[in-house]
Amino acid sequence: MYSYKTLQELVNRKIDQEDLAKEPKQLYEPIKYILSLGGKRIRPVFVLMACNLFTDNVEKAINAALALEIFHNFTLLHDDIMDNSSLRRKKPTVHTKWNSNVAILSGDAMSIIAYEYITRDKKNNFFEIIDVFNKTALQVCDGQQYDMGFETEKMVSESDYLKMIELKTAVLIAASLKIGAIIGGASQEDAELLYSFGINIGLAFQIQDDFLDVYGDTKVFGKQTGNDIRTNKKTYLLIKAFELAKDNDYEELYKKFFVDNKPTEEKVNKVVNIYNKLGIKEIAKKTILEYFNEAFNNFEKVSVNKERKKELSFFIKNRLISRDN
Amino acid sequence: MYSYKTLQELVNRKIDQEDLAKEPKQLYEPIKYILSLGGKRIRPVFVLMACNLFTDNVEKAINAALALEIFHNFTLLHDDIMDNSSLRRKKPTVHTKWNSNVAILSGDAMSIIAYEYITRDKKNNFFEIIDVFNKTALQVCDGQQYDMGFETEKMVSESDYLKMIELKTAVLIAASLKIGAIIGGASQEDAELLYSFGINIGLAFQIQDDFLDVYGDTKVFGKQTGNDIRTNKKTYLLIKAFELAKDNDYEELYKKFFVDNKPTEEKVNKVVNIYNKLGIKEIAKKTILEYFNEAFNNFEKVSVNKERKKELSFFIKNRLISRDN
């Protein structure tokens, strides 16, 4: 079984080898740039790890792995334009370093390159794979649209929020696992179990991100806390707080987000105090744990011996902090 | 043999039947909108006509036809953002009617939907088709990037211009014909001949568009002439004029495009006078005719009897005005 680190290195090596020194430079340099910003490479590594559950030959999933990573980076590139974000992994975003037109077009090209990768393996199970890929790719667009729609709405329900993060984040993680499994030769049942595993892991990861933005240890996670509060971002924590807050707390939250919403430390402190009073920290941890448990309920049913599941299991348990934070 | 009109109606009917009343509305309504703006549907009809050269069963090419039309409209949607165009087929562009973010995301979804269509037909020749589609899709992005790059350059050579229009316009027309031919059961040789036919037709069409913008009959073509001159657009005519103009004419052209470039009638008149003096009208007509002849050299070699070629031949001869204008 290959470790996360080994597979991550394989992905990085393959990305480095990709010939992107092509003309026109203005189209391909931004692609090279965003792919070189690194990141955890979760999706491509999950493709390979899921494949590795069923076979030692993970090389046969490398094109699909790269397709998923390139597709993901295409969505980041366009999301950054839409969200007007100036930084990505501490570096200027493509539309900031170049301009919006370059970012639109390079993103378009990346989406095509992702398809080019997924169609490199001309095998029997190709149509099964491409159907998952097409459906997922469109769902990610749906998710981004729901997310943008939330910005103009004051109140978002928990179920709408969960639907949004499922589409925007979880389905691509789930699809990575499912596609890797199919390539590895999994039965349809196992591929579906890994898909459900991925959905639940994706939801857990996203709610954990929301959680860490408030309760994360700055030293460990390297980010200033409270950014989501400062920027009025709708998170699982905020949605639960609006759901549970009464009287003065509700008014205070409302004021801090919709009336006097300056991105001050005072805002962060006031909001976190309300979160604490309402027990939002515990609620979020409980929800993360529920998704985590549901994920592993599915994972345990995958008809592969425990030994083969160790690496994937280890990586996810390490990334999910809900049980000891 | 089906006529252009019959096949165009088939395409329109299929587009109307497509279920785009989906959620989130902000994502799918713009897609429905741009697809409903109509147009000549050249690419999908060419898919069907090329298929029809080899078989009477054109229905089997309908998914590929729609894929090409949806892909083309995706590029229009994003090009309109990049070019800051407010009108498309006399209606507001998507980013004007909604906003840029909606236009970026709906375009992204359309590109995925195009792929979804092209992968609907799970047949033996699928990989041949998808390889043409992938390569072409990326070339169209290359072409758009070259076109945008031209805006910041003063002088563009004829060969660079021809390369740009080949990538931005001709390859998609050529791919439509090639894909239709493959689906119809053409030999590889015939598919390639139709591809070359398409490249030459695409180049002839584009140069003809440049020509008609200056020398078109407003009553026939329904557009005001001189728009490209007013908006400083680099066209085949302008590039040839800069290449051939000397002394005062060159200075005058330079002044009108790069110094005192207000979009006035005086500018249009002055530039057209120079075009006339340099014989640009005749040069453009000659070039269009050369591409037209080269196109039909290839078309005649396609191993299908003349009778079957009549509809496609008739449509193109009707659209190309170079010989009698």
Image: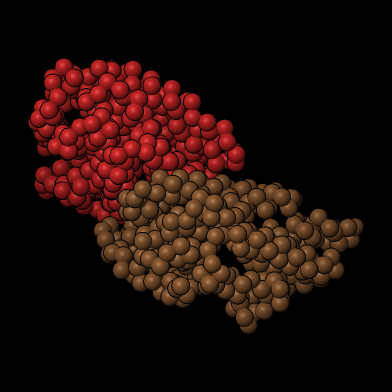
Chain colours: A red, B brown
Image position of B181 with respect to A211: above or below: below
In the shown orientation, is residue B323 left or right of residue A287? right
Quarter of the figure with the C terminus of chain A: top left
Measured along the vertical axis of the image, is residue B246 above or below residue A231? below
In this picture, residue B29 sits left or right of residue B160 = left
Residue placed farthest to the bottom in the image?
Answer: B219
Quarter of image, res B254: bottom right
In the image, A131 versus B218, the foreground residue is A131
Position of the N terminus of chain A, as image quadrant, is top left
Q: Position of residue B278 (x, y in %)?
A: 84, 65
Q: Residue furthest right?
A: B247
Q: Can I make out residue B35 in this image?
A: no
In this rendering, would B73 be left or right of A2?
Answer: right
Is B279 placed above or below A38 here? below
Residue at image location 64% in from the left, 71% down from the top: B320
Q: Residue at x 33, y 21 (%)?
A: A7
Observer able to see residue A156? yes
Residue at image location 57% in from the left, 32% down from the top: A21
In front of the other: A18 or B127? B127
Quadrant position of residue A322: top left
Looking at the image, residue A73 lies above or below residue B211: above
Foreground residue, B49 or B281? B49
Q: Find residue B181 and report its horizontal and vertical position in percent.
A: 47, 58
Q: Nearer the viewer, residue B15 or A201?
A: B15
Question: Which residue corresponds to the image point at 46% horizontal and 37% vertical from the top-left?
Answer: A93
Horizontal and vertical percent position of residue B325: 71, 76
**Residue A233 location, x and y as percent?**
29, 43
